[in-house]
Image: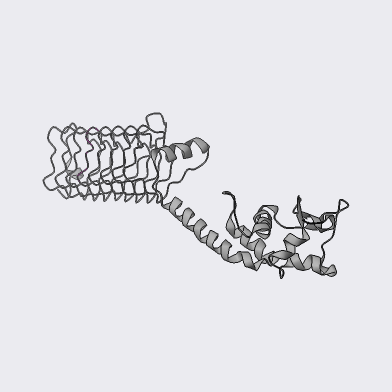
Amino acid sequence: MENSEDWIKLNIGGKVFHTTKTTLMGRDSDSMLARMFLQEELIPSRQMDGAYLIDRSPEYFTPLLNYLRHGQLILDANVNPKGVLEEAQFYGITSAIPQIMKLISDYNQRVSSKIEEPLTRLSIIKALIVTSSCSELRFQGVDLTDVDLSQLELRNINFKYAKMRRCNLFQANLSYCCFERADLTGALLDSANLAGVKMQRCILEGASLKRANFVDPLSSKPLRAHLEGVNLRGANLEEANLDGANLRVSILKDANLQNCYLRGTDFAGANLERCDFSGSDLKNANLRGAYMADAVFDFVITPLHMSQTIGQ
């Protein structure tokens, strides 16, 4: 049992620790802590209450002191082992380093596996709740394959390069979102609000966009939807509102565009092979340079002018 003279008080970064010289010198006698109390000239300065002052992190010192007491390095869940390693190297407690390196390896694996976990509807909702409406929310390059995001308020979010195959976005508010180069193959966007979206080179092959709205009716100067170079091969856009949208050099081969609102829509240079425009409103649409082999224009509300059909 230690005598009273063996007990010492350490003030590490403002937090006071009570321990003994035997603890500090017993397990790692070559450490800086051990030498502090073996050699008079190395003893740190003291406060009036008798505590020895050391300007280091108390959070990372705690597990090291416990290690000196019983030989096991145990970290609380919120303690980063990399910080403990820095302190072990500072204090010269080299015998603890092998255990710390093992903990760092385990920590890195946990962080890596957490990053690679696919996002869920719940995790998206949590992100929406904690993010201010004035802040930009980014989901660039994330994996949302098969995730149900139907009927959620998702406006102004950056989904650039996101993997969203077969994602359910039914009736979701996606106004002014960025989907540039995102993969939405087979996604469900029926009745979604897509006003002012940026979908340049987005992949929407086989997607369903029935009754989707690309126009903001409340804006005095609505931004046109940008779908330049988008891949809508085989997509279903029946009754969608694409008034004024930019679909230049896009791929709409075999797409269903029946009964769509396409006033002023720019299809210049687009591949419209076997597209079905039956019953659609194409007033002032730009079809110059579009490839329209076997496209269907039955019962088109606004007759096409020759200048609009160059390249047919």
242 lies left or right of 47: left
State left or right for residue 143 relative to residue 39: left
Give yes or no for residue 119 being in the magenta stretch: no
Residue at (31% x, 43% y) in the render: 146
Q: Nearer the viewer, residue 306 or 13?
A: 13
- Pick the residue in front: 234 or 64: 64
Residues 268 and 33: in front is: 33
Name, please, the residue furthest toward the top.
218
On screen, 104 above or below 218? below
Q: Quadrant of residue 286?
A: top left
Could you tell me residue 124's position as x and y percent?
A: 43, 40
Which residues fall within the magenta stretch? Answer: 234-239
Secondary structure mostly seen in the magenta stretch: loop
Q: Is residue 301 left or right of residue 168?
A: left
Residue 152 location, x and y as percent? 39, 33
Q: Name which quarter of the figure residue 222 lies in.
A: top left
